[in-house]
Amino acid sequence: MYIVGGRIKTMAGEDIREGCIRIAEGRIAEIGRRDEVILRPGPNERVIVVRDGLIMPGMIEAHCHMGITEEKKGAEGDDCNETVNPVTPYLRALDAVNTMDAAFDDAVRAGITSAMIGPGSANVVGGQFAFLKTKGRRADDLVVKAPAAMKVAFGENPKVNYSGQGKSPSTRMAIAAMLREELTRAFAYADKKRRADDNGEDFEEDFSMECWLPVLRREIPLKAHVHRVDDIFTAVRIAREFKVKMTLDHCSEGHLIAEELGKEGFPAIVGPDLASRNKIEVQNMAFKTVGVLNRAGVMTAITTDHPVSLIQSLPLCAGLAVKSGLPLEEGYRAITIHPAVICGVEDRVGSLEVGKDADIAIFTGNPMEVFSRTLYTIIDGEVVYEAGKE
């Protein structure tokens, strides 16, 4: 397949006007100016001609619950939170994702080609996220990385859920203590397993602890649900204590402590700012947060937190962040290469470069502008959406 013409935003350098992309075996084989890529389509090979459109990497949703909290299904379609045990690290999002959820089709039509999907925030430890492509019937076939993160949550959600059941955690102190206890157990388990391996001894694996090993090896981050300033700092404190990677998800009051967070070095996934301020801890939520954090040196991505706000609104959320002070190019980065880096999949997606997955979205114009339309969505080199052929 070839894509010819238009303006290519590679997110890996300069834009290319009147460019050409050659796709082979689901990956980008060549990319450059029209006069740099020789156009030699084979029999039945498709050539997409883009005249005035914008060609860019497929957008990435860095934090959502689509396929787990299904639209229009009520309790039967809600598998987001296991609300009977506050510590459930062994749960895997992949086991609950229903790719027949309408949100997948909405994502594809919007030019969103991949998403980080996982448990909600009712538990202190909710389980493992998975990073998936957005088109297909079998979730296993959509996996880019699984596990991709371990969900942990601070503040209002775990407090409300478990204090109502008459058990811990009912305070922020208990949330932090329970996470510390779990991480201490996980490190002890890892040490015991390592010693047994070094000594050639038998070792009985513990299913509830094995899931922590990628976190302890810093292969995947803690994915910390944090809104308020105090919860953000508690998450940072614990990540520093245990020397683990972490992303600050939601980070609704991050703009109030941007300079401190810039020094800490943890990335932030901000949103859903399009939603209402329906909880105490999101009273300071604002679209300006992304821009303030970005100026302080924090790598930022934008999230809809679908279904809290709809996944197809992702580019509009980026546009509203730009309207509130985020530089335009950073708006593009916040829905492409930044979430790819934050989710640990930048070797596959997030920019248009030779060797990366051919996940491409083509629009009539800037997708952050409300009147821009999706012309094509391409995943792994296959056209999965084409305007006018719904």
Image (cartoon, grey):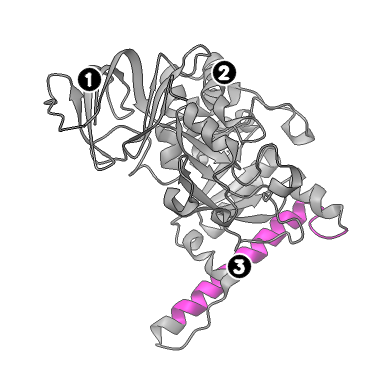
Q: Are marks 3 and 1 in contact (CB under 8 Å)?
A: no
**Kind of residue indicated by mark 3:** Thr
* Residue at 78% across, 34% down: 279
Query: Which residue lies under the disc numbered 2?
Result: 320
Label 2 or label 3, whichever lies nearer to me, is 2
Distance between mark 2 and mark 3 Cα atoms: 41 Å
Q: Position of residue 50 (x, y in %)?
A: 29, 16
Q: Position of residue 54 (x, y in %)?
A: 35, 18
Q: Is residue 130 visible?
A: yes
- Range drawn in magenta: 166-195
For label 2, the crowd category at 10 Å Cα-Cα, with few meaning under 14, some 14 to 19 and many 20 or more, is: some
Label 3 or label 1, whichever lies nearer to me, is 1
Horizontally, residue 260 falls left or right of residue 160, namely left
- Between 103 and 307, the one nearer to me in the picture: 103
Distance between mark 2 and mark 1 Cα atoms: 29 Å
Q: In terms of secondary structure, where does tag 1 sit?
A: strand
Q: State which tag comes first along the sequence, 2 or 1.
A: 1
* Residue at 57% across, 18% down: 320
Query: Which residue lies under the disc numbered 3?
Result: 184
* Residue at 47% across, 40% down: 134
Q: Quadrant of the N terminus?
A: top left
